[in-house]
Image (cartoon, rainbow, N blue to C red):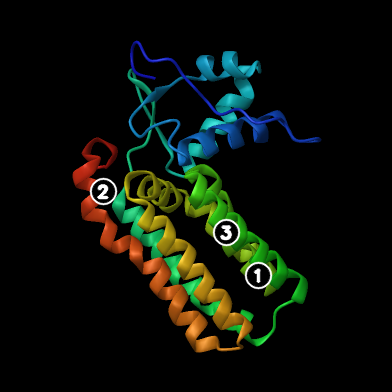
Amino acid sequence: MNEGDEMDLNIKARNIGESTRVYVYNILSDNIINLNLKPGCSISEKEIADLLNVSRTPVREAFIQLSQEDLIETYPQKGTYVSLIDLDLVEESRFMRETLESAVAKLAAKEFPQALLFDLESNLNMQSFCIKEKNYTQMMKYDDEFHETLFKGTNKSRVWESIQRIGAQFRRFRTLNLVSTSIDTWETTYQDHTLILKAIKGKNGDEAAEMMKTHLTRAVFDKIMLQEKCPDYFKR
């Protein structure tokens, strides 16, 4: 962290059977993506190890994975920092998601398990609640779960896992978008999801795919506004 700053991580309970390395990685990844650890802030292995009451080895291993995902950067003689948001990487991830998720939405309209349709309906109810409560962290959680369920229902869960591995920059950008914009942005996200589900339930694959494309293209139009509002968060 910057000098004089106190680290304030959101630390969740450790899952049963979860290795220390995975636990540390999940804590750090979640806090970076949710902007508790802001772009450009410094972090150290010792500081994290002390805070989480673990040895430095799993922290070092988590740092390696976070570096591979472009979420942190280490500079010799300077230290380790949360990476700035790289809009080129954001666009690569967005393009990948648009391409794959449009195809998945079209598949979902052909055939989708009834139980998972119910899960999507329940998810939308929770998104609506998060909007009313202005809880962007939970909104992001249900947003991700909505998309993940589409992959699960079309037997493409491994594709979703691949997206998650290289899509961290885009997820962080979306978090910043939710935090920095008006509640209208949240409402738009919710309405997009509602229309996607409606098209899937109506067996309209082309409409589902087009709505998904529109949904994932919105981020393109938010780049300039977010750069102007939070210039220190972006790589120049």
Q: CA distance from mark 3 to mark 2?
A: 27 Å
* Front label number (2 vs 1): 2
Q: Residue furthest right?
A: 17
Circle 3: residue type: Ser
Q: Residue furthest front?
A: 132
Question: x, y (%) of residue 131?
Answer: 49, 51
Q: Is residue 96 above or below residue 112?
A: above
Circle 2: residue type: Leu
225 or 21: nearer the viewer? 225
User: Judging from the image, what secondary structure is the residue with disc 2 in?
Assistant: helix
* Front label number (3 vs 2): 2
The residue to which callout 1 is attached is 156
Question: x, y (%) of residue 125?
Answer: 61, 60
Question: x, y (%) of residue 204?
Answer: 55, 89
Quarter of the picture containing the C terminus is top left
Say left or right for 53 vs 221. Answer: right
The residue to which callout 2 is attached is 226
The residue to which callout 3 is attached is 162
Looking at the image, tell me whether mark 2 or mark 1 is earlier in sequence order: 1
Q: Can residue 104 be seen by looking at this rendering?
A: no
Circle 1: residue type: Lys
Task: Check contact, mark 3 vs mark 1: CB within 8 A.
Answer: no
- Please give the name of the residue rendered at 37% of the width and 57% of the height, measured from the top-left corner: 185
77 or 106: nearer the viewer? 106
